[in-house]
Image (cartoon, grey):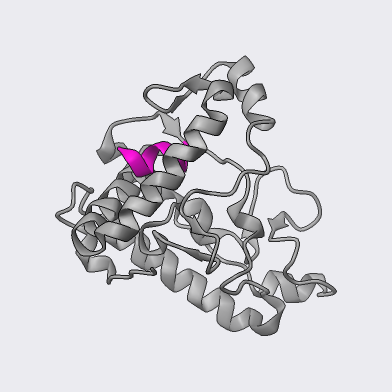
Amino acid sequence: MHVGHPSGMLGGMGLPRRDAELVQIVEAALAGAAARAGEWLACRIGCTQCCHGAFAINALDAARLRAGMDVLRQTEPDGAAEVERRARGWIAEHGEDFPGDAQTGRLGETEAAEERFEAFANEAACPALDPATGRCDVYAWRPMTCRVFGPPVRMEGEGGNGLGHCELCFVGAGQGVVEACEMTIPHDLEAAVLDEVGDAGETVVAFALLR
């Protein structure tokens, strides 16, 4: 199962209108960076290293995943049920150690909760990942973290040239090559669209797939 749709379909599914614009811009930036990178970019279907380990997603990402699951329930109910089964299994396995509210899926915002999250479910496969195919079953609605992982992106606190990328990519490439393949992220637009959601809380993918 690998359902896709044009970004224009995102409107009208409980998402801010400008989310479609955000997705379109990010997808275009990814395509451009990938074209410039060529074989330096190792990302391929079946390469699932980035699909392991819990990471925080914002309320906009969560809303997009919920919208995607609504589409899947209508178009591929068996596939949606399998995603939900994996998500429930993920929560059953890791929920006891969840650094937040395991009933709502909201991550804690205290310094202690953030420290606990650093060591939380670091080896766990994302429940959206189909282990048989190595594909993401909600790829068209994936979080922004997933959309920008791989190519070089500008990161605060990074040493050297300030660019970070997947460790499997650009192996042996010089700094000039990496810099030429930088993917520009529209942070201001994402922040503006997130403001429309009106929720500053964060969660993880498993909870968003079920709500």
Q: Is residue 114 visible?
A: yes
Q: Which quadrant holds residue 47? A: bottom right
- Image x and y of residue 9, in percent: 21, 65
Residue at 59 percent of width and 23 percent of height: 97
* Residue 196 in the image: above or below residue 74: above
Residue at 64 percent of width and 31 percent of height: 120
Question: Depth check: 37 or 3 in front?
Answer: 3
Residue at 18 percent of width and 59 percent of height: 74
Q: In the drawing, does residue 64 fall left or right of residue 99?
A: left
- Image x and y of residue 204, in percent: 47, 38
Q: Quadrant of the N terminus?
A: bottom left
Q: In the drawing, does residue 180 fall left or right of residue 97?
A: right
Question: Depth check: 126 or 15 in front?
Answer: 126
* Residue 67 in the image: above or below residue 38: above
Q: Is residue 57 visible?
A: no
What predominant SS class does the magenta segment belong to?
helix
Question: Depth check: 120 or 181 in front?
Answer: 120
**Residue 190 belongs to the span the image colors magenta:** no
**Residue 206 belongs to the span the image colors magenta:** yes
Magenta-highlighted residues? 204-211
- Image x and y of residue 137, in percent: 41, 61
* Residue 14 in the image: above or below residue 163: above
Q: Which quadrant holds residue 5? A: bottom left
- Image x and y of residue 202, in percent: 44, 32
